[in-house]
Amino acid sequence: MDAKITHEHFQLKKNVPELRAGDRVKIHQKVKEGNKERIQIFEGLVIKAQHGQGINGTFTVRRIASGVGVEKTFPLHLPSIVKIEKTKSARVRQAKIFYVRNLIGKSAKRLKREREDAKVWEDVVEEKVEKDPEQEQIEKEIEKTEVTEQTEEKAEDKTEENKSDKDNKIKNHEKSTQIPKVEEKKK
């Protein structure tokens, strides 16, 4: 029963990125500040990914900002996440790499066997843009004129085809109706 609910949930995203511990990612997230809305990027290392790709799937990203470690846990199907860019991927042998918290300096920035693995996951959502009613009328009129022009062109093509077909039929009919002349033999 729970499986049906999670697969048919309205908030589930269609194409979910496959994130694992050891991936370096950039998360593009919508942030509202008053009336304004902007996209904020949080870049860091995925230290754990939990609960798979279902409705309750989460992943934790860690970065070092001003010498202080900052961790954020994101739900996988969070509506405010617009894009996830996977820049690098390291092969780690643990599902949760909390030992990274104790590393200092270059060892904290670089993992062993890290390689370039660029992938981009983007949540494509059609944004409804309100159009001016006058602009909509102009667009409709343009479409109508294009349609009428196309139908007129088709009609002209058909009339030309019909004329040529009629001419060919008439010629063929004339040829078939002609009585072959037989010359009389003189005795």
Image (cartoon, rainbow, N blue to C red):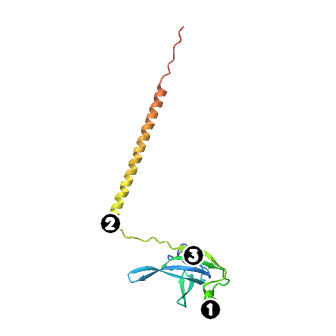
Q: Residue at x 46, y 30 (%)?
A: 173
**Residue ranking furthest to the right:** 93
Secondary structure under the numbered disc 1 in the rendered image: helix
Q: Residue at x 36, y 56 (%)?
A: 144
Q: Residue at x 39, y 49 (%)?
A: 151
Task: Quadrant for residue 121, please give it.
Answer: bottom right
Q: Are marks 1 and 3 in contact (CB under 8 Å)?
A: no
Question: What separation in Å lies between label 1 and label 3 (alpha carbons)?
Answer: 28 Å
Image disc number at residue 133 = 2
> Which residue was labeled with disc 3?
17
Secondary structure under the numbered disc 2 in the rendered image: helix
Please tell me how crowded label 1 is: few (under 14), some (14-19), or many (20+) other residues with Cα within 10 Å.
few
Query: 78 left or right of 157?
Result: right
Identify the amino acid type marked 2. Pro
Image location (x, y in percent) of residue 139: 36, 61
Compared to 131, does 164 lie above or below? Answer: above
Task: Quadrant for residue 164, please give it.
Answer: top left
> Which residue was labeled with disc 1?
102
Image location (x, y in percent) of residue 161: 44, 41
Identify the amino acid type marked 3. Pro
Residue 1 visible? The answer is no
Question: What separation in Å lies between label 2 and label 1 (alpha carbons)?
Answer: 61 Å
Residue 17 visible? The answer is yes
| 41 and 74: which is toward the camera | 41
* Image quadrant containing the N terminus: bottom right
Query: 143 left or right of 100?
Result: left
Nearer the camera: disc 2 or disc 1: 1
Which circle's residue, 2 or 3, is located before the other in the chain?
3
Query: 74 left or right of 129?
Result: right
Secondary structure under the numbered disc 3 in the rendered image: loop
Task: Quadrant for residue 49, please give it.
Answer: bottom right
